[in-house]
Amino acid sequence: MLNLIVSLIAGILLYVPFSMYLPKIWQAIPPALIGLVGVYFYLSRRTWKQTEALFRDSMQLLEPLQQRPDIANNPDRRNAVIEQCIEKLKGGYALARWQFFLSSQIDAQIGIILYSVKQDFKDALPYLEKSFKRNWLAQAMLAVSYMKKHKPERMEEIFEIAVRLNKKQDLLWNLYAYCLHKIKKTDRAIEVLGRAQKALPSNNVIVDNLVALQNNKKMKMKNYGEQWYQFHLEKPPTPKIANPRFSRR
């Protein structure tokens, strides 16, 4: 918001002197508009760079959860790391008054972390509800949350907006169909995957899952790996422990 206000002021400051010295007043409009757009582009770019740095630094705080089993397997230490990351992200709200949609981007990131990493679905919900509509991952988690709360109409409403804005996200389409099948709306799930096939005609996962549903079989989502398991609809497979082999002398 403030970036736009500053840009408008810059445009006015350019318009006034040009209008005084040019033969006709309207001739001052083009340079004023150029100045306005230029200043807004510069300020917006600066704000988004600051935001990207904030997101990058925040995500680095979560690295111990992947690299340090002693932290990842200790609930108190694990939650402390997650809370530290979230608090750093909340510091970005100070930037949100400068740029449109920035607050909802931060809410989306916080909601995703609470849902997928901390598995605190209750606290994640208000952030996911305020998340940026084009952030398909946050919106998908929001839709799944409503499915778990037994609100299928709200779930479908959110999924419909998400797939309309993110037509090329095959996991999103498959997740939508999976949730419909899970609540016993298999016909609707087939219809959704039919639409997905038109949007992504060469996607094998969509084709395979569509055929599976048409034959009253379960959808296969495990090929998406961690992308799929972050929705916590299925448990990841337990790693197999190889039997020790003893050498013979």
Image (cartoon, rainbow, N blue to C red):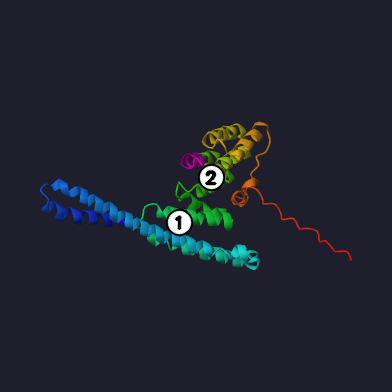
Q: How far apart are marks 1 and 2 (CA)?
A: 18 Å
Where, quadrant-wise, is the C terminus in this rendering?
A: bottom right
Where is residue 54 shown, x and y percent of the image?
Answer: 45, 62
Which residue is identified by label 1? 106
Label disc, if present, on residue 80 of the rendered structure: none
- Dot 1, how many residues are within 10 Å of its Cα: few (below 14), some (14-19), or many (20+)? many
Where is residue 75 shown, x and y percent of the image?
Answer: 62, 64
Q: Which amino acid does label 1 sit on?
A: Ile
- In this image, 105 relative to 7: left or right? right
In the depicted view, which residue is nearer to us: 123 or 214? 214
Which residue is identified by label 2? 143
Q: Is residue 1 visible?
A: no
Where is residue 134 shown, x and y percent of the image?
Answer: 45, 46
Determine whether 176 is above or below 227 in the image: above
Residue 164 lies within the magenta run: yes
Main secondary structure of the magenta stretch = helix
At x 59%, y 33%, the residue is 190
Determine whether 28 is above or below 80 in the image: above
Residue 168 lies within the magenta run: yes
Q: Is mark 1 on a helix, strand or loop?
A: helix
- In this image, 158 relative to 26: left or right? right
Read off the magenta span.
Answer: 157-169
